[in-house]
Amino acid sequence: TAQAPLPIELLAACGPTCFFELEFPAGLSFADFDVRLLGRRPFPGSFYPQDSIHAALRAPNAATLHPQLPWVRFGMQAHLLGMGFVELRSRDGRWHAGSWIENPRGIHADPLKIAFEGANWLVAHVPIPAGAAAVGAAFRLIERLPEGSKQHPRKYSASSSAQGELRFDFLEPGEYRLFTHSRDWFPFERDITIVPGANDQGTIALVPRPEVGSIRGTIESKSGKYEGACHVSLSNTPFEHDAIFDHSLDFEDDGTGRLVAAFELENVTAGEWFLYVHCHDGFVHTQSLRTVIAPADDVHIVLEDLSATVEIVLLDATSGELLGEDSVVTWQVGEANDRADGPRVELALMPDSPERITFLAEAPGYRPRRGTAADFERIPGSETSPARLRAVCKLDRGFGGVLLVRDRSSGSPIDGAEIFIDGALAGTSNADGEFWIELTARPERIRVAKNGWRWVSSENVDSKTGRLGDGPEFYAAMERL
């Protein structure tokens, strides 16, 4: 039935209203499709769903701007940066199509011309044995990339139903590893090739894991003083943090003055597990990974926590004088990172492993500089004081920063992108998708180009004006054409 059109002022405050010029696959109509609005081209790079706004594809309506075309109205306003990606997916998982829109709000008068493409999917039958505690199994599908590749692998997750049905929809062709990730089933793993269309894996027979008991133990450090943030996890995969069984660690005085963390992982299922002690602050321990079988009541792990004091000094490269108090050092070690103000920074109880410490030094009017292990000089400690790692960082006057060229959909680095500064070719991005800018003054305009790619605006790089925002890291986003 005809509907009265919403006022223009209201539609401008909502998400976009779009019209489509399309030809439906045989046997399908507008009622067979779901529409999503995303901030980037769909990429399954995480096991967690990508944020999106959903809406129904609507039939042509005489009260609309294009009465003969199917359309969609996203009632919720999308907080996207300049562009949005509208994707249509068939409810049977076999067809999809999409298009970029320049403004993710208001009425789009020009219809989007799209062509449906056949989707790819995987199916398998996973029967549930009689008496099994679980009614389904969680599976993962991870793209297998060449060794040394800096691309981010595609990742999908799905669970089999109580009826034994397993299905992964909207897959990209390629080489993958299919495996279980569950406390209830013994590990299953298979290398597969996803081809266009249907990919039937037949029957996957899983073996249940019964519950057999708990794993208990204690963790201490060689110094007896370590009290950092740590977890202990059980997993099918080595070095996996926040895994199937997980326990946060709290180090407490055991009555002798030493700090010890006790843990108990309950209701552990049968078979061999990897036990991993994961410390967030960059300490790496030789006993942090071992195999265990439940029940076990006497697991004892001693962590090596050799520490050092880290000193970073920022100087003017010409005069050799200390930089001003408005200089900044941003440092990272492991998952720990922070920002310290001033030209002389001292960090206590850091891992005595300079190869794990990186920092970025910056100051107004100077080119920023990245620091690595090569910048540190070791000053030996004594029985009463830790060693010192000292880095003297000299900054040159001028403008600088690192341009990070990334695939907007996957976040993977893009190498070989041409960087133009004020109209002249300055160079290309490296294998890490990085290009360092070092100039006497801030450029008026930059441009990023690569065959088969389109440069789009990001948080601090405007593709329309070529202006750079705040640095020293500038994110240049690109989309495949």
Image (cartoon, rainbow, N blue to C red):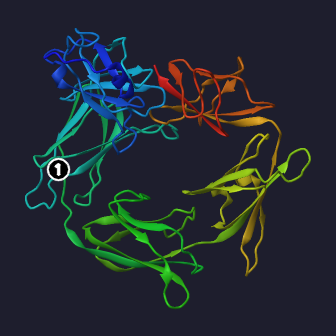
Left or right relative to 96: residue 230 = right
| Relative image position of residue 322 (x, y in whole percent) | 85, 54
Q: Nearer the viewer, residue 302 or 399?
A: 399
Q: Nearer the viewer, residue 122 or 93?
A: 93
Q: Residues within 10 Å of mark 1 (few under 14, many from 20)?
A: few
Location of residue 94 by image quarter? top left
- Tell me the residue at 65%/30% (across/down): 468
Q: Position of residue 289 (x, y in %)?
A: 45, 66
- Residue under pointer 1: 205
Q: Amino acid at mark 1?
A: Ala
Instruction: Please indicate, yes or no, whether residue 202 appears anywhere in the rendered image.
Output: no
Quadrant in which residue 426 is drawn: top right
Total numbered labels placed on residues in the image: 1
Looking at the rendering, in which quadrant would you find the N terminus?
Answer: top left
Residue at the image position 31 percent from the left and 28 percent from the top: 74
Residue in view at x 52 percent, y 38 percent: 150
- Whether residue 471 is visible to the viewer of this picture, yes or no, is yes
Q: Is residue 109 placed above or below 238 in the rendered structure?
A: above
The C terminus: image quadrant: top left
Residue closest to the eye, 324 or 205 = 324
Dot 1: what SS? Answer: loop
